[in-house]
Image (spheres, grey):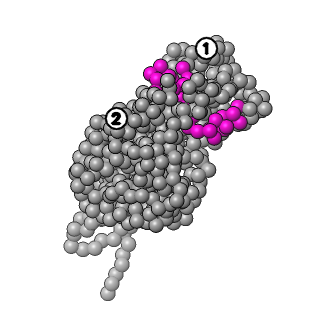
Amino acid sequence: MDVSQVEKVKEEVFNRLGISATENGIFSGSWKKGKSSRTIRSISPIDGTNLCSIDQATENDYNSVVSTSVKAFEEWSQVPAPKRGEFIKKVSDALENSKKDLGLIVSLEIGKVISEGQGEIQEMIDIGHYALGLSRQLFGLTMASERPFHRMYEQWLPVGPVGVISAFNFPSSVWSWNSFIAAVCGDSVIWKPSSKAALSAIAVTKVVASVMEKESVPPIFSTICGGGAEIGELLSKDPRIPVVSFTGSVATGKIISKNVAERLGRSILELGGNNGVIVSSKADRSISMKGLLFGALATAGQRCTTTRRAIIESTIYKSFTSDLIQAYSSVNIGNPLKSETLVGPLIDESAVKTYQKTVSEAVKQGGKVLSGGNILKIKGLENGYYVEPTIIEANDKVTISNDETFAPILYVFKYEKIEEAIKIHNSVPQGLSSAIFTNDIREEEAFLSSSGSDCGIANVNTSTAGAEIGGAFGGEKNTGGGRESGSDAWKGYMRRQTVSKNYGKTLPLSQNVEFRIS
Ligand code: UN1
């Protein structure tokens, strides 16, 4: 029976990872109990099984974590970067050793299907490898000085403790994108995980903490569980934390960004996405269909990169949507621990309510439900949070399609010309990921031109979701402008210093300025 399967997996994985029914919510060199009277209850969205109870931190707890992290930073920033990289590689290896169990924790707590839970841990392993290479490539530029016997160059220096506030949907990998890069840059990191995914954070922290202890490195990675309104706010207002990376909603991102800006700190924001794909009549049908299905349905529509809008050329609109409806009807929805399941549950009851409200609002605004639209009660999983993946035919009057709803709701639009498709595509406030499916080079280039996709990520013939760690991840407009993970995103975790050095016997001034001292 399903209930016993969740219990069984829980028991096995908890044993192997050393997790108990109650866990301390703070790691800061050692595990500590948060002094708040409130606890976080981690409940599986699969069937409502109680997973774990985790205590929460108070402001005093927070201050002691920051003091430890500041001290760790002072020591760690003196370690040569390639040595820091070697340590991160060891963390990555330890995660690889526990990949199966950590992935299962993510599946239990978030409801990700097995392969996606494992993929989440793989993303951490990958960024660990990337960080090792990066640790020998924190390059600065040299410039030609206009003054004789002068040398000019820039160097990149560690910036200080970095705050990472992560969301439930990628409960560990988004932390690692930030933290492994920050760590090779010489920073310490304080992690405030989502209260909806605190157990995943605790499990990952256990593995990471054991490597820190074994390698005798200072406690550069701290974890602190607590409410966003308390701990998140403290982090954002704290001048001891020069960089705060936040992943989550636009509304909270605005508050965090304002708090950080008020003290002239730096924020790295990865906020909502409302990702569209353009499906041209010149696309390969099987590639576009698979790309759209993965983008719309992976993680039950709860990725920042989820495809929420399909903009389909009128000549294929009818046949494409009918194939899409057909494909939706064959998708297995249910227990994510079963290998045949493609779509697991939503995270909690409030997500189900938002799904329902969004569908009925879309209908009120003139949208037509082509597939799905209902809550699902699955036998044996009655306390889980399942909904039918939904396709809604929309037009510009269906303004709810401008919002990001964390659920498997796909709006379909029709277009005549590529210019119109791009206009519909860019008409939403968010700008994270985007895609075009076409084999026509002109359409593809139109999509990639300066008047094309306005997003931080643009894909051709592949899905909006499933970005690799090697690229810079993030987006424009309401997505917040931050970049994490690959490319030169590391610069966000360091401070740049321009160095001018005079090795001559006089003091010539720049811009030919004469400064005569008699
Ligand atoms: C997110 O949803 O916040 O590109 C991150 C993807 C994943 C990461 C998503 N690699 O879908």
Residues under labels 2 and 1: Cα distance?
35 Å
Classify 222 as above or below 502.
above
Q: Which residue is mark 2?
A: 99
Give whichever of 423, 114 is nearer the camera: 114
Percent of width and height locating residue 88: 28, 46
Q: Amino acid at mark 2?
A: Lys
Q: Which residue is mark 1?
A: 326
Circle 2 or circle 1, nearest the eye:
2
Residue at 38% x, 44% y is 19
What span is colored magenta in the figure?
332-359
Res 27 seen here: yes
- Would you say 513 lies left or right of 247 here? left
Image quarter of residue 476: top right
Residue at 43% x, 48% y is 22
For the C terminus, the image quarter is: bottom left
Magenta segment, prevailing SS (helix, strand or loop) = loop
Classify 345 as above or below 134.
above
- Would you say 191 lies left or right of 259 here? left
Image quarter of residue 469: top left
Instruction: Confirm whether the magenta stretch covers residue 468.
Output: no
- Mark 2 in CB contact with mark 1 (< 8 angstroms): no
Classify 503 as above or below 474.
below
Percent of width and height locating residue 200: 43, 42
**Which badge, 2 or 1, is on the more N-terminal residue?**
2
